[in-house]
Image (cartoon, rainbow, N blue to C red):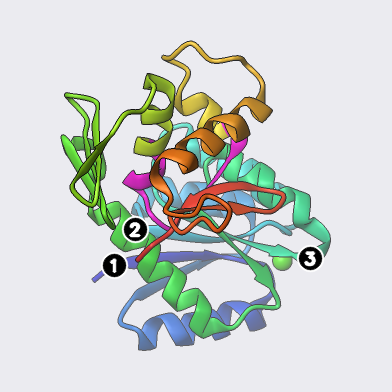
Amino acid sequence: MKTILVVEDEQKIVQLVRDYLENAGFQVDSAADGQAAVEKTRQTKPDLLVLDLGLPGMDGLDVIRAVRRDSTVPIIVLTARAEESDKLVGLELGADDYITKPFSPKELVARVRTVLRRVENAPDMREVIRAGDLTLDLARMRLEVAGREVELTPTEFQLLAVLTRQPGRVFTRSQLLDAVQGVAIESYERAIDAHIKNIRKKIEPDPRQPRYISMIYGVGYRFNEE
Ligand code: CA
Protein backbone atom coordinates (compact mmCIF):
# COMPACT_ATOMS: atom_id res chain seq x y z
CA MET A 1 0.00 0.00 0.00
CA LYS A 2 1.33 3.44 -0.92
CA THR A 3 1.66 6.01 1.85
CA ILE A 4 0.84 9.66 1.24
CA LEU A 5 2.09 12.32 3.65
CA VAL A 6 -0.32 15.25 3.78
CA VAL A 7 1.31 18.46 5.04
CA GLU A 8 -1.26 21.07 5.99
CA ASP A 9 -2.01 23.08 9.12
CA GLU A 10 -5.76 23.29 8.52
CA GLN A 11 -7.19 20.19 10.12
CA LYS A 12 -10.43 20.36 8.11
CA ILE A 13 -8.51 20.06 4.86
CA VAL A 14 -6.31 17.28 6.25
CA GLN A 15 -9.41 15.32 7.24
CA LEU A 16 -11.07 15.80 3.86
CA VAL A 17 -7.98 14.80 1.92
CA ARG A 18 -7.40 11.85 4.25
CA ASP A 19 -10.93 10.54 3.70
CA TYR A 20 -10.66 10.67 -0.07
CA LEU A 21 -7.17 9.21 -0.25
CA GLU A 22 -8.03 6.38 2.16
CA ASN A 23 -11.13 5.60 0.12
CA ALA A 24 -8.91 5.41 -2.93
CA GLY A 25 -6.78 2.79 -1.19
CA PHE A 26 -3.88 4.87 0.10
CA GLN A 27 -2.43 4.94 3.57
CA VAL A 28 -2.36 8.51 4.88
CA ASP A 29 -0.05 10.19 7.34
CA SER A 30 -0.10 13.90 8.16
CA ALA A 31 2.09 16.71 9.44
CA ALA A 32 0.83 20.11 10.58
CA ASP A 33 4.03 22.11 10.07
CA GLY A 34 7.10 22.17 7.87
CA GLN A 35 9.60 20.90 10.41
CA ALA A 36 7.47 17.84 11.17
CA ALA A 37 7.03 17.27 7.43
CA VAL A 38 10.77 17.19 6.79
CA GLU A 39 11.39 14.86 9.73
CA LYS A 40 8.56 12.48 8.80
CA THR A 41 9.72 12.35 5.20
CA ARG A 42 13.19 11.29 6.36
CA GLN A 43 12.00 8.78 8.92
CA THR A 44 8.96 7.15 7.32
CA LYS A 45 9.84 7.55 3.62
CA PRO A 46 6.33 8.16 2.25
CA ASP A 47 5.63 7.44 -1.43
CA LEU A 48 4.35 10.95 -2.11
CA LEU A 49 3.89 14.32 -0.39
CA VAL A 50 0.83 16.54 -0.69
CA LEU A 51 2.29 19.80 0.53
CA ASP A 52 0.45 23.03 1.33
CA LEU A 53 2.67 26.04 0.70
CA GLY A 54 0.98 28.15 3.39
CA LEU A 55 2.32 26.71 6.62
CA PRO A 56 3.16 28.37 9.94
CA GLY A 57 6.90 28.77 10.59
CA MET A 58 8.92 26.96 7.94
CA ASP A 59 6.89 27.49 4.76
CA GLY A 60 6.17 25.00 2.00
CA LEU A 61 8.91 26.21 -0.33
CA ASP A 62 11.49 25.70 2.44
CA VAL A 63 10.08 22.22 2.97
CA ILE A 64 10.67 21.40 -0.72
CA ARG A 65 14.24 22.71 -0.47
CA ALA A 66 14.94 20.64 2.65
CA VAL A 67 13.32 17.46 1.34
CA ARG A 68 15.04 17.70 -2.04
CA ARG A 69 18.47 17.68 -0.40
CA ASP A 70 18.27 13.94 0.03
CA SER A 71 15.04 12.68 -1.50
CA THR A 72 13.33 12.41 -4.87
CA VAL A 73 9.91 11.64 -3.32
CA PRO A 74 7.18 13.04 -5.59
CA ILE A 75 5.64 16.27 -4.28
CA ILE A 76 2.26 17.76 -5.19
CA VAL A 77 1.98 21.34 -4.01
CA LEU A 78 -1.25 23.00 -2.83
CA THR A 79 -1.35 26.74 -3.42
CA ALA A 80 -3.88 29.47 -2.78
CA ARG A 81 -4.67 31.76 -5.72
CA ALA A 82 -2.78 34.57 -4.01
CA GLU A 83 0.35 32.42 -4.16
CA GLU A 84 0.32 31.93 -7.95
CA SER A 85 3.98 32.87 -8.32
CA ASP A 86 4.92 30.37 -5.62
CA LYS A 87 3.66 27.55 -7.79
CA LEU A 88 6.35 28.45 -10.32
CA VAL A 89 9.03 28.58 -7.65
CA GLY A 90 7.70 25.30 -6.29
CA LEU A 91 8.08 23.58 -9.65
CA GLU A 92 11.55 24.98 -10.02
CA LEU A 93 12.58 23.72 -6.61
CA GLY A 94 11.51 20.26 -7.68
CA ALA A 95 7.80 19.83 -6.96
CA ASP A 96 6.16 17.47 -9.46
CA ASP A 97 2.74 19.02 -9.80
CA TYR A 98 0.52 21.65 -8.21
CA ILE A 99 -3.14 22.11 -7.45
CA THR A 100 -4.81 25.45 -6.72
CA LYS A 101 -7.06 25.93 -3.69
CA PRO A 102 -9.97 25.56 -3.42
CA PHE A 103 -9.61 22.17 -5.08
CA SER A 104 -11.82 19.15 -5.55
CA PRO A 105 -10.60 16.18 -3.48
CA LYS A 106 -11.42 13.91 -6.45
CA GLU A 107 -9.10 15.96 -8.63
CA LEU A 108 -6.38 15.63 -6.00
CA VAL A 109 -6.76 11.84 -5.90
CA ALA A 110 -6.50 11.75 -9.70
CA ARG A 111 -3.31 13.85 -9.60
CA VAL A 112 -1.80 11.63 -6.92
CA ARG A 113 -2.44 8.58 -9.11
CA THR A 114 -1.00 10.27 -12.20
CA VAL A 115 2.18 11.39 -10.46
CA LEU A 116 2.73 7.94 -8.90
CA ARG A 117 2.22 6.30 -12.31
CA ARG A 118 4.79 8.64 -13.82
CA VAL A 119 7.34 7.71 -11.19
CA GLU A 120 6.67 3.98 -11.53
CA ASN A 121 7.30 4.08 -15.24
CA ALA A 122 10.90 5.02 -14.29
CA PRO A 123 11.70 6.34 -17.71
CA ASP A 124 15.31 7.32 -17.07
CA MET A 125 16.63 3.86 -17.75
CA ARG A 126 14.84 3.47 -21.03
CA GLU A 127 16.82 3.72 -24.24
CA VAL A 128 13.74 4.24 -26.35
CA ILE A 129 10.93 6.59 -25.42
CA ARG A 130 7.51 6.05 -26.94
CA ALA A 131 4.99 8.84 -26.50
CA GLY A 132 1.93 8.94 -28.71
CA ASP A 133 3.09 8.70 -32.33
CA LEU A 134 6.65 9.59 -31.37
CA THR A 135 9.54 7.20 -30.93
CA LEU A 136 12.83 8.61 -29.65
CA ASP A 137 15.88 6.39 -29.88
CA LEU A 138 18.17 7.99 -27.31
CA ALA A 139 21.39 6.23 -28.22
CA ARG A 140 21.07 7.04 -31.92
CA MET A 141 19.42 10.44 -31.36
CA ARG A 142 16.77 9.46 -33.85
CA LEU A 143 13.18 10.57 -33.88
CA GLU A 144 10.32 8.96 -35.73
CA VAL A 145 6.86 10.51 -35.91
CA ALA A 146 4.26 7.96 -37.01
CA GLY A 147 6.99 5.90 -38.65
CA ARG A 148 8.56 8.81 -40.51
CA GLU A 149 12.08 9.88 -39.54
CA VAL A 150 12.38 13.54 -38.52
CA GLU A 151 15.72 15.35 -38.22
CA LEU A 152 16.25 17.37 -35.05
CA THR A 153 19.23 19.35 -33.82
CA PRO A 154 20.87 17.95 -30.65
CA THR A 155 19.22 20.67 -28.54
CA GLU A 156 15.81 20.02 -30.01
CA PHE A 157 16.24 16.30 -29.48
CA GLN A 158 17.25 16.77 -25.86
CA LEU A 159 14.29 19.05 -25.16
CA LEU A 160 11.84 16.68 -26.75
CA ALA A 161 13.31 13.77 -24.78
CA VAL A 162 12.79 15.64 -21.51
CA LEU A 163 9.17 16.44 -22.38
CA THR A 164 8.22 13.00 -23.69
CA ARG A 165 9.78 11.16 -20.75
CA GLN A 166 6.96 12.54 -18.62
CA PRO A 167 3.88 13.22 -20.71
CA GLY A 168 1.44 15.44 -18.84
CA ARG A 169 4.10 17.05 -16.68
CA VAL A 170 4.52 20.81 -17.00
CA PHE A 171 8.12 22.03 -17.19
CA THR A 172 9.14 25.63 -16.61
CA ARG A 173 11.45 27.23 -19.16
CA SER A 174 14.28 27.27 -16.68
CA GLN A 175 13.86 23.54 -15.95
CA LEU A 176 14.03 22.90 -19.69
CA LEU A 177 17.10 25.07 -19.88
CA ASP A 178 18.75 23.03 -17.11
CA ALA A 179 17.85 19.84 -18.91
CA VAL A 180 19.76 20.82 -22.03
CA GLN A 181 22.73 22.32 -20.27
CA GLY A 182 25.02 19.66 -21.71
CA VAL A 183 24.28 21.08 -25.12
CA ALA A 184 25.47 24.48 -26.35
CA ILE A 185 22.51 26.75 -25.82
CA GLU A 186 22.12 30.45 -25.23
CA SER A 187 21.57 30.80 -21.49
CA TYR A 188 18.33 32.62 -21.94
CA GLU A 189 14.89 31.19 -21.23
CA ARG A 190 13.34 32.72 -24.33
CA ALA A 191 15.68 30.52 -26.33
CA ILE A 192 13.50 27.62 -25.17
CA ASP A 193 10.54 29.20 -26.98
CA ALA A 194 12.52 29.35 -30.20
CA HIS A 195 13.57 25.70 -29.90
CA ILE A 196 10.03 24.58 -29.11
CA LYS A 197 8.82 26.50 -32.14
CA ASN A 198 11.33 24.63 -34.31
CA ILE A 199 10.39 21.25 -32.83
CA ARG A 200 6.73 22.00 -33.49
CA LYS A 201 7.43 22.83 -37.11
CA LYS A 202 9.03 19.43 -37.48
CA ILE A 203 6.62 17.21 -35.57
CA GLU A 204 3.24 18.91 -35.46
CA PRO A 205 0.78 18.29 -38.31
CA ASP A 206 -0.38 21.89 -37.80
CA PRO A 207 2.15 23.93 -35.78
CA ARG A 208 -0.41 26.71 -35.26
CA GLN A 209 -2.66 24.24 -33.42
CA PRO A 210 -0.13 22.07 -31.63
CA ARG A 211 -1.30 18.63 -30.69
CA TYR A 212 1.80 17.24 -28.98
CA ILE A 213 3.41 20.10 -27.08
CA SER A 214 1.27 22.65 -25.22
CA MET A 215 2.43 25.93 -23.78
CA ILE A 216 1.15 26.47 -20.26
CA TYR A 217 0.68 30.19 -19.89
CA GLY A 218 2.97 31.71 -17.28
CA VAL A 219 4.69 28.39 -16.56
CA GLY A 220 6.26 26.57 -19.50
CA TYR A 221 5.60 23.54 -21.66
CA ARG A 222 4.10 20.08 -21.49
CA PHE A 223 4.05 17.05 -23.80
CA ASN A 224 0.38 16.05 -23.80
CA GLU A 225 -0.81 12.73 -22.52
CA GLU A 226 -2.83 10.76 -25.05
CA1 CA B 1 -2.29 26.09 5.23
Q: In the figure, residue 151 lies in which quadrant?
A: top left
The kind of residue on which mark 3 rests is: Arg
- Asked whether residue 48 appears in the rendered view, the answer is yes
Residue topped by disc 2: 47
Kindly report the distance in space between the C-alpha atoms of the residues bearing marks 1 and 2: 6 Å
Q: In this view, does 169 lie to the left or right of 145?
A: right
Question: Which residue lies at the image location 36% right of the left edge and 50% below the top edge?
Answer: 166
Q: Does the magenta stretch include residue 171?
A: yes
The answer for how far apart the CA atoms under marks 2 and 3 are is: 27 Å
Q: Name the residue under label 3.
A: 81
Residue 125 falls inside the magenta stretch:
no
Give coordinates of residue 179: x percent, y percent: 45, 27
Position of 92 with respect to 122 (left or right) is right
Name the residue nearer the viewer: 115 or 143.
Answer: 143
Residue 130 drawn at (x, y percent): 22, 49
N-term mark: 2 or 3:
2
Q: How crowded is mark 3: few (under 14 residues within 10 Å), some or many (20 or more)?
A: few
- Residue 78 horizontal/vertical position (percent): 63, 64
Give the quarter of the figure containing the N terminus: bottom left
Q: Is residue 202 above or below residue 156?
A: below
Q: What element carries label 1?
A: loop
Residues tagged 1 and 2 counted as in contact (Cβ below 8 A): yes
Q: Residue 217's x, y, as percent?
A: 69, 53
CB under 8 Å between callouts 3 and 1? no
**Range of residues picked out in magenta:** 162-174
Mark 1: amino acid: Lys
Q: Residue 128 carries which label?
A: none
Dividing the image into four equal quarters, which quarter contains ligand 1?
bottom right
Residue 2's tag is: 1
* Quadrant position of residue 110: bottom left
Name which residue type carries label 2.
Answer: Asp
- Which residue does the image show at 52% across and 50% down from the upper left? 207
